[in-house]
Image (cartoon, helix red, strand yellow):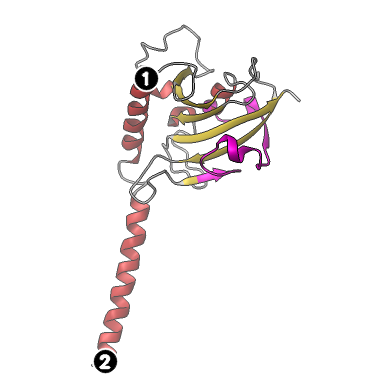
Amino acid sequence: MKKFYWILSVLCGFTFIACSESKEVSEFEGNWEERNMAYIDSIANVARKNLGDDVGQWKVLKSYKLPSDGSILGATDNQQYVYAKIKKVGEGTVSPIFSDSISVNYSGRLIPTTSYPKGYAFDQNTRLDINEENIALMQPIHFITGGLIAGWTTALQQMHKGDIWQLFIPQKLGYRGEAQTGIPAYSTLVFDVALIDFGF
């Protein structure tokens, strides 16, 4: 009889583990695309109501791949814009161009979920919350402005040296329907990016 209860408890344990794993996996399945689209729509609404150039304000940046027709506020497709919340205003006055080498610190995560209220961190060379106090301790990463996803390239060409922005990149300017390591298909990407230097 004891053996029966032992087997039953082991089976219940496996069932519990399997349910826990499937719950975590399911956070990024099912209606993941719709949830990401709704999330970027909510960010777009906040950003468009708080435009400015100061800390805490937002920039709405049309994809560099689209013609520049000045239609930021009248946009109907929120998937064609990067939404940038200003965390620090740098001292620079010029921005990187498409072919520039850049030096950045960054962290990347997905939209908030039940298991990851700040968003699942899929990539970073630094802490999730970049600020002036910890930025001096970080080793920057080097890229070419035009060699990145469209959302990054769009934002970097508007940033100045020393700027720290939080970028909200819709899936159309990220990886679209292609899953990457740690990034499900159709994911909105949230990056904290500090532009350390460029053009070297």
* Type of amino acid under label 2: Lys
* Type of amino acid under label 1: Asp
Q: In this view, does 56 lie to the left or right of 38?
A: right
Inspect the magenta stretch and tell me whether residue 135 lies in it: yes
**Can you give x and y, in whole percent of width and height, for residue 143 in the image?**
67, 32
Q: Which of 136 and 151 is in front in this view?
A: 136
- Mark number, residue 77: 1
Numbered disc 2: secondary structure: helix
* For residue 177, above or below residue 79: below
Looking at the image, tell me whether mark 2 or mark 1 is earlier in sequence order. 2
Range covered by the magenta-colored residues:
122-151
Numbered disc 1: secondary structure: loop
Give residue 134's quadrant in the image: top right
* For residue 99, above or below residue 114: above
Q: Is residue 97 left or right of residue 64?
A: right
Q: Name the residue under label 2.
A: 2
Q: Which residue is drawn at 70% across and 23% down?
A: 100
Q: Quadrant of the N terminus?
A: bottom left
